[in-house]
Amino acid sequence: MNLLILEPPYSHLFKELVGALKPKTTFVHLFNLGYLVFLPKLRFSLITRELRKRNPSPESIKRVEGIRSLANSNIKSPTPSELKLMACYLEFLRNFIAKRQITHIICHNDLRWQHAVAREVAKELGVTIFFLEDGLLRPHTLTFDAQGVNAFSSVPQEPEFYQQGNFQISKGFRKIRQPWSKRIQRLLFFSAFLCLNKVGDILRLNVKLRNKYYSFTQYGKLFLAKLDLVSSPPMNVEISKKYIFVPLQVTKDTQTIIHSQFGGTQEVIDLLETAYSELPDDLRREYSLVFKKHPMEAHVNYRFRDDSLVSAGNTGQLLEGASLVVLVNSATIVEALIKKKKIISLGNSHYNIPGVLLKSTPAQICADIESKLKDPAPENESLRQSFLNFLIYHYQINGNIFYYDEETINRMKERLTLGPAR
């Protein structure tokens, strides 16, 4: 095995995986100097230098123009200079794979622009590529898939697959504990990442086309919030009626700006408030519309109508009492399925299986909400359970990108050599 690592997670998971795999050679494409914190002692190519003098062909520019990524989404189109950079990397990667005889590529997330480009090149050259992401049952699982994440994943979409399969609950499944010592260690490593990122900016060693912009202030607030050292502004409300629950995404989440028709969370709010206002009077008297902001956006001032309720309550408890869950797409769907809730999704995802949930559209959403509220029939219980068992105990890998053990590494190693679980 000749292994190439693109941008990794903010942890040493890939370094540990390399130690277990023992590939013949391992290379790293370094787009941001900060990642040296998580990939020490591995041979790397500094991409900003590799691409500096390249001049891509018109064919390569045309090809990357059609690749959906964080650089080419519902809210952003790549500039000519960004298209040139992506095309340069496409050509460089193609040549690098051939020259170094790369057989496997691993990376974190499938919609960072370089990873989306790598997917195209890997498919063209017959190279195995795997995408890592936070799991569907958080924080106890992670995703490691050769096709992509969520809507791009290898999860079968045919109900027959789950009706005919015998997917057993794994006795070895375990809940992941996150000790304080590990949380502090994680914070220190990420602080070092931010420092090296800043050095890379100053020395112009980081690639200009960014998937994220990093600042100490932004991530300091986020980490303090996760460590429960700061509190969000109170938004708990009293819910006196039955309700429709809408868990919101981060406004620039890929599930919204890539895998749906929306340009951000405010568009989702506006659509669902309009749909709610168009419901029959008797349904609006019986049901409230309850939103919950994503924890990372507790301080974002979205616009809500006066008759909407915005809660900061526990998501699990809000799901428990909901009569219907409506969302674009989120791992929250797994928790909603576990709680046997009726679900309507507005985005493209691997959850959109007839009998598991209802996939709707902006034009159809009002009618679909009305139909689901009036329909007393439960969803297909056996299909729902089979789908959940497959996702949690077969498709997912126990562990997460920050807290993992030898079993997590071995499952990833096995997946790389044998392919996706079926």
Image (cartoon, helix red, strand yellow):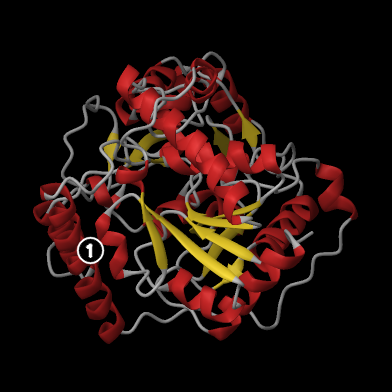
Q: Does 293 appear above or below 167?
A: above
The reply, left or right, for residue 259 in relation to residue 202 is right
Amino acid type of the residue that numbered disc 1 sits on in the rendered structure = Phe
Residue pictured at 56% horizontal, 24% vertical = 370
Q: Residues within 10 Å of mark 1 (few under 14, many from 20)?
A: many
Q: Does 228 appear above or below 8?
A: below
Outermost right residue: 164
Give the number of callouts: 1
x, y (%) of residue 74?
A: 40, 22
Q: Is residue 268 visible?
A: no
Give the image quarter of residue 168: bottom right
The reply, left or right, for residue 318 in relation to residue 161 is left
x, y (%) of residue 201?
A: 15, 48
The reply, left or right, for residue 156 in relation to residue 365 is right
The reply, left or right, for residue 240 in relation to residue 20 is left
User: Mark 1 highlights which residue?
Assistant: 193
Give the image quarter of residue 288: top left
Residue pictured at 26% horizontal, 57% vertical = 33
- Between 44 and 186, the residue placed more toward the observer is 44
Quadrant of the image containing the C terminus: bottom right
Residue pictured at 34% horizontal, 64% vertical = 10
